[in-house]
Image (tube, rainbow, N blue to C red):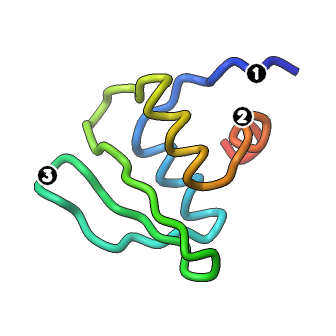
Amino acid sequence: MSTRFPVVTSKEIVRVLEKIGFVFVRQTGSSHAIYKHPAKNKRTVVPMHSGVSLKRRTLKAILEDAELEVEDLRKLL
């Protein structure tokens, strides 16, 4: 399979994070939401810009925080 990152919006990545157990903790301002996994004690920040796809580097950081691979993300989308 390809290791290329899919193009996703913040709404789609939030849906994936919630599927794997992350919960919304708080939002800083109007542009960044913080999600935390209670069992793993992991945290990630998701930029909340409506209709804008996440940059590749930002998506990679979110996936590393959530301990997900690109293939896992594709399956969960």
Which image quadrant for residue 77?
Answer: top right
Q: In the depicted view, which residue is nearer to us: 35 or 7?
A: 35
* Amino acid under disc 3: Ser
**Marks 3 and 1, how far apart at CA:** 32 Å
Q: Residues within 10 Å of mark 3 (few under 14, many from 20)?
A: few
Residue at x 60%, y 46% (from the top left corner)? 64
Contact? badges 3 and 2 (CB < 8 Å) = no
User: Which residue in the structure is indicated by mark 3?
Assistant: 30
What is the number of the mark on residue 70?
A: 2
In the rendered image, the quadrant that contains the N terminus is: top right
Query: Tag 1's secondary structure?
Result: loop
Q: Nearer the viewer, residue 54 or 11?
A: 54
Identify whether 20 is placed above or below 15. below
Residue 57 in the image: x percent, y percent?
A: 47, 26
For this orientation, the residue located farthest to the left is 29
Residue 4 spot, x, y in % from top left: 69, 18
